[in-house]
Amino acid sequence: KAEAEMAEDLPNLALSPAVEPRHAITVLYYLREDINDEYIYFQVSSAYTTAKKERVLRVSTHRLAVTGNTAQMLHSLDPEVAGVLMAKEAVISVREGSMTLEGAQEELNSRLQTIARTWSDQVKVSVMGRMSQMPAQLSLLPSLVFQLQNGPLMGVILNDEDDVNFVRQIFLNANVEDALRLLNPTLFSTNFDPNALQYTAVPLEDLQLLPERMLVLDHHTHVFIWSGAQCSGKEYDGLRQALIQDWTNRTVYRFPAPEIQVFKEGDSMARWLICRLNPSHRDANNAGVVKSMMSAVQGLLRQKFAPTDDLSMLEWLNALRIAQAS
């Protein structure tokens, strides 16, 4: 109660009523003027109650070097943390109503364009014209922003407003690892030995939905297990059960517990996986798995997907005049 009363008088006091060990607090700082000192210091005081009901006060101090060199500054950045911070800022703006969803998306796109134009001295010339290049240290950033705008946080995957708000709240409270799983999930291809499962990360795109593959997508609140046409028979039921058990064990301490969904190629419910993947089948000169295939096979693979207005990541980048990372 005393701390709640203090919060009314101290704007820098944050109360976090949580008992989850992976709960995180995100603090955004904005630079109002140049800093002439050699270092800048951040100090945080936190008070919490342990499992033994002991009250603990902890003071943490972190020092960051100040530089006027753009290359040194870019080298010090963590692109995953930068992407999570940009995403949380956008989600908060939409949730609190200070921005519309469309306005937040435009703001994100504008910031990417500014970064590409300002912080990189490389320009690519293509059939699309002159394209700005993202700095190498931030080459992951466009992918994170693309997934943010097309995933459950700011996309149209979830229709119910309560479901959207639920996922957004989990994301805002998440640490970097969990936030990245919601923002940019990993798609895995698995082997076919139920007694020795092995996973290989593959690009998060719909062209990975090959008939001879079994895929797993961990999107934090959901785990999707997909079987291609060639491995959808009953003889693979044991493998699917092994995958369900393995991912149940992997997520046993996750809260809330993710829902595990299993479907086969052609199932109506498979759309829950497909809508989370970059529709790279729209790219005529895709540099991924399709480029190595014969034209006839490419055509058959592209025919599997229903036509939509969703842009692929390459089309989206082209519209922003940003070159795709090589």
Image (spheres, grey):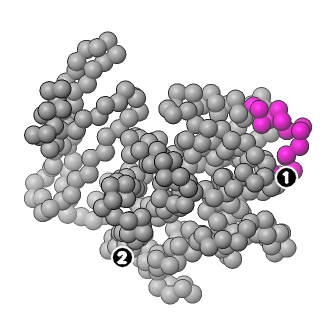
Q: Is residue 62 visible?
A: yes
Q: Nearer the viewer, residue 11 or 252?
A: 11
Q: Evaluate whether residue 190 shows in this view.
A: no
Instruction: Look at label 1 and name its amino acid.
Output: Ala
Instruction: Looking at the image, tell me whether mark 1 or mark 2 is earlier in sequence order.
Output: 2
Instruction: Tell me where residue 11 appears, x and y as whole percent.
Output: 14, 44
150 to the left or right of 54: right
Nearer the camera: disc 1 or disc 2 = 1
| Residue that numbered label 1 is attached to | 229
Q: Residue at x 46, y 79 (%)?
A: 321
Which of the image's four quarters has the N terminus? top left
- Magenta range is 228-242
Tell me how far mark 1 sits from mark 2, CA to CA. 45 Å
Q: Secondary structure at mark 2?
A: helix
Q: Give the residue drawn at x 69%, y 77%.
A: 284
Q: Residue 283 at x, y = what percent?
A: 66, 74
Image quarter where the C terminus lies is bottom right
Farthest top residue?
52
Structural crowding at the residue carrying mark 2, measured as other residues with C-alpha within 10 Å and reported as few (<14), some (14–19) or many (≥20)? some
Using the image as rendered, state which of residue 216 and residue 60 is in the foreground: 216
Mark number for residue 7? none
Residue on which disc 2 sits: 117
Q: Is residue 218 above or below residue 126?
A: above
Say which of 156 and 28 sits in front. Answer: 156
